[in-house]
Amino acid sequence: MKRTPRIKPALLIASAAAATVLVGSIGGATMALWHDDESFTSQIQTGKVAFAVGAPGATLAKSATASGQTLNFTFGKAEAATLLSSKAVAIPIQVDSLSQGNKGMRYSVASPTFGPDSLFGAAKTELVRVDTAADCKLAPRPQLPSPLPSGYYTRTPVSSDYSAATTPTSEFWCLTATLDKLPGAGTYTNKATVTATPDKGTGTVTASDQWWANVTSVADASKEPDHTIGFTFETFRPGK
C-alpha cells in the first residue's frame, strides 16, 4: 500500500528590496509578517518665517513673521546733525531673512523721497546695496543696483528649496547723503542806485551804495523730521 507523505508546517523566508516576508501555514491558516527596513526623510512644507530690519547689530529694531508686511527703517535728527556738521553721512541698514521648509522669501525696497525743507531734501542721496555693513561709506561708492520699472529694488535672499536653517540670511544697504553747501549758505550782495534832480540847476545827481554778507547756514538739524525707508517682504512656494 502506497503511503501519502504527511505535510509538515513549513516556513518560507524571502528577502527583496529591503523587505523581509515571513509566511507560514498553521492549521490550514496562512499567516504573513512584513518587516520593511526602507527608510526615508520627509520634508516639512511649512516652518518658521522671520524678517527683520534695523541698524547693523545683534538685535534689529523691527521684525515681522507674517508675509506681506512692511517694516520701516527710520532716521532723522541724529543723522541730520552729522550731515550738517560734516556735509556728508553714510547710514548702514541690515535686513535679515529666514524662511524654513519649502517657502522662499523675497523683499522690495524703494529709494526714499525727502521734503524740500529738510536737510536730506537739500542733499544728494543714494540708496545702494553693499556686501557688509563696513562697506557703507561715502567713497568709493558702490554701484547702484538696477531698479524695476516701478522704482523698487527686489531681492530674493531665500530660495524655495527646502531649508531647515535657523540662522537668517543678512543683507546690507547703505544710504549716502552729501551736501555741496549748507542750506542757505553763501555770499549775498546788493547794490542800490538813486538818481535825483536838484531843485535848482540842471543835470542829475546819482548816488549808489553796495552791501554784502556771508551767510553760513540757516539749517537746524533739531527740526529735521523723521524719514523712513520701507522694506516689504513676502514668502512664496516653489515655481512661484
Image (cartoon, rainbow, N blue to C red):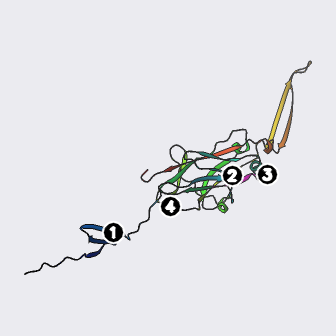
Amino acid marked by disc 3: Ser
Q: CA distance from mark 2 to mark 1?
A: 59 Å
Query: Nearer the observer, disc 4 or disc 3?
Result: 4
Is residue 227 toward the left or the right of residue 152 in the image? Answer: right
- Residue 62: horizontal and vertical position, in percent? 66, 50
Q: CA distance from mark 1 to mark 3?
A: 84 Å
Is residue 194 toward the left or the right of residue 229 in the image? Answer: right
Amino acid marked by disc 1: Leu
- Up the image or down, 207 lies above or below 176; here it is above
Q: Which element is circle 1 on?
A: strand
Q: Which mark is residue 61?
A: 2
Residue under label 1, please give it.
33
Q: Which element is circle 4 on?
A: loop
Q: Residues within 10 Å of mark 4 (few under 14, many from 20)?
A: some
Sequence-wise, the earlier of marks 1 and 3 is 1
Residue under label 3, please give it.
85
Q: Which mark is residue 225?
A: none
